[in-house]
Image (cartoon, rainbow, N blue to C red):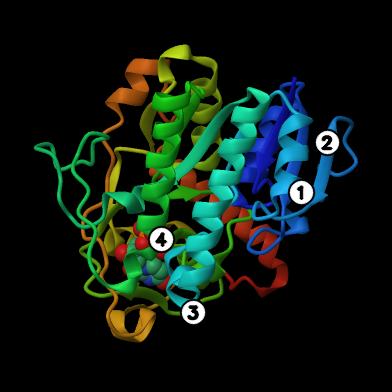
Amino acid sequence: MKVLVTGGAGFIGSHLAEALLARGEGILVLDDLSTGSLQNIIHLMRRPGFEFRLGSILDMRAVDESVAACDVVYHLGAAVGVRLVFEQPVRTMETNVQGTQHVLDACLRHGRKVLIASTSEIYGKDAQSGTGRFREDDDITIGSSMRWCYATSKALDEFLARAYYADKGLPVVITRFFNTVGPRQSPAYGMVVPRFVEQALLGRPITVYGDGSQVRSFTWVGDAVEAVVRLMEVPAAEGEVFNVGSEDAVTICELAELIRGMTGLASEIVHIPYEQAYGPGFEDIHYRVPDISKLRRTVGYAPTLSLREILERMIGYTRERLGGKVQETVG
Ligand code: UDP
């Protein structure tokens, strides 16, 4: 089998490419290196069965040729991260909507099954089902500020994919990634765990935005990758949407304290107002935790690593990456 991974030089995409390669699949990565980087896949470049093509999902021909050359498609190429999107709304909408349409069209033309990567952002504001956790069949309540450009573009991707399934019989699987953590995740896009770990190891203040009562849950990237690969193997997942995340909830304040405690260092925990962190008009999501019973039911799988294990790995990885810059342990 040969597998196309669009966005395969990005954070989750590069881990997915690596995992599929390890299972003996041939891999073609299509990536324009806009938010992804060659650094993420440099270790795969010389492995037999791995191929990289520099190109955009907005280039219909590049997409068509790449899809034609493969048996199955994982579409992770997108303009990602709320901050980037806030800064470049037109580019975001174009990349996410036109790019996905190119991929779906090419998959239909060549008869390829496709996974469409979506995001927990599309749940929008804090409207939850009875359990307090987001469920796939919850209503979507997107706000009116430009922050919601990203969610809107991904919601349209989901509906497009479901329309191709319903109307044209294209086999699609849609996954909504919740907060995912692992090596090579860039702190530059605002991701809280790599930021806090780096701040703690450098002995700098740990920057909690707002009062820190906001709740998230974090999934190890290897667990998220395992979930999507299993979903693509199960016919019952076709035409369906799945949360991919962890149910292990934590407040951002607790996260900061946990990371500080685990590094054994004495960084100060500081609170930064949202306006200062994101600029005016930013709305944070107070409670974001998935209900993953549908994933469990469909593939018999749930993330394996606890928050503490995830943080242990991230601290180890970041310590190595920062080398001599890491502060001496106190106490
Ligand atoms: N956050 C924080 N300090 C940081 C970066 C993020 O307090 O330095 C908060 C952010 O406001 C959000 C949570 O951590 O409430 C998760 O942020 P992230 O950007 O990782 O993901 P999101 O869930 O917002 O997509």
- Disc 2 to disc 4, C-alpha distance: 31 Å
- Does 275 sit above or below residue 211? below
Q: Which mark is residue 41?
A: 1
Q: Are marks 4 and 3 in contact (CB under 8 Å)?
A: no
Residue, disc 4: 150
Residue 135: % across, % down? 23, 36
- Mark 3–mark 1 Cα distance, whole angstroms, equals 30 Å
Callout in the foreground (4, 3): 4
The mark lying in front, picked from 1 and 4, is 4
Question: Could you classify mark 2 by the number of other residues whose Cα lies within 10 Å: few (under 14), some (14-19), or many (20 or more)?
Answer: some
Q: Is residue 280 left or right of residue 310?
A: left
Which of the two marks, 1 or 2, is nearer to us in this view?
2
Q: Residue at x 44, y 46 (%)?
A: 157
Dots 1 and 2: beta carbons under 8 Å? Answer: yes
Tell which circle, 2 or 4, labels the residue nearer the N-terminal end.
2
| Residue for badge 3 | 204
Q: Which amino acid does the dot numbered 3 rest on?
A: Arg
Under mark 4, the amino acid is Tyr
Residue 77: x, y in percent? 60, 50
Which disc number belongs to residue 50?
2
At label 1, which amino acid type do we have?
Answer: Ile
Disc 2 secondary structure class: strand
In the displayed image of the protein, which residue is found farthest to the left? 130
